[in-house]
Every structure is written in structure tokens, then in C-alpha cells.
Image: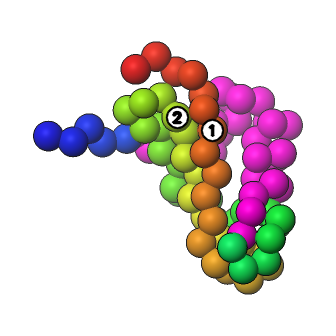
Amino acid sequence: MAKVGRKITNQELADKIGAENLVLVIDHVYCAECGPTAMVGHEDNIVIEPSGDTILRGKCKKCGHKVAHLLETDEPK
């Protein structure tokens, strides 16, 4: 049976990595269509994977293309 990640809120992630770091993560993503950009619409799609990594999924602020950001949060497995 595959392990499933656990969803967390935007505030939980901000508490974990710091609000200023969360802003940096959101403002620095790469879109396959636009290049460097910011992420929007990620608030309801933040998941801590069983590996401990955190994935934010959202959309490009410029064109709306899907983007994601992987954070290696080093949580215990």
C-alpha cells in the first residue's frame, strides 16, 4: 500500500520555515512557459510527503501554468 502525504496549511508551513522564507519560496519558482516567476493558488495544496519533503503546488502568477516547489524540510520519516 502506498503511503500518502499529509496536507498542511499555509500558516503551518510559515510557522515551520518562517514567514519570510515562505515568501521567498512563493516568489521564486520556475514556470516552463514563462521562466522565473511567482506562485499563486498554492494555499490549499501544500503536502508533507512520507519522505519528509514538502511540496507546494500552484499556478504561475504570469500565465496560470501549473508550477510546484519542493522543500527538503528534513523532517523525520
Q: What residue appears at the point 43 percent right and 38 percent down from the top-left corner?
A: 49
Q: What residue appears at the point 61 percent right and 58 percent down from the top-left corner?
A: 68
Question: Does the residue at mark 1 contact the one at mark 2 (Cβ under 8 Å)?
Answer: yes
Q: Examine the structure image and report whether residue 57 is included in the region drawn in magenta.
A: no
Q: Give residue 61's quadrant in the image.
A: bottom right
Q: Which range of residues does the magenta coloring cover?
A: 6-31
Among the two numbered marks 1 and 2 on one chain, the one whose residue lies closer to the N terminus = 2
Q: Which residue is mark 1?
A: 71
Q: Looking at the image, is 32 positioned above or below residue 2?
A: below
- Specify few, some or many for label 1: CA neighbours under 10 Å numbering under 14, 14-19, or 20 or more: some
Q: Amino acid at mark 1?
A: Leu
Q: What residue appears at the point 65 percent right and 27 percent down from the top-left corner?
A: 16
Q: Which residue is mark 2?
A: 53
Q: Looking at the image, is 3 positioned above or below residue 57?
A: above
Q: Is residue 43 left or right of residue 18?
A: left
Instruction: Locate the N terminus and report the quarter of the image it occupies.
Output: top left
Q: Position of residue 64 (x, y in %)?
A: 67, 80
Question: In what element is the residue under mark 1?
Answer: strand
Query: What's the distance in space between the residues labelled 1 and 2, CA to CA?
Result: 6 Å
Q: Examine the structure image and report whether residue 17 is included in the region drawn in magenta.
A: yes
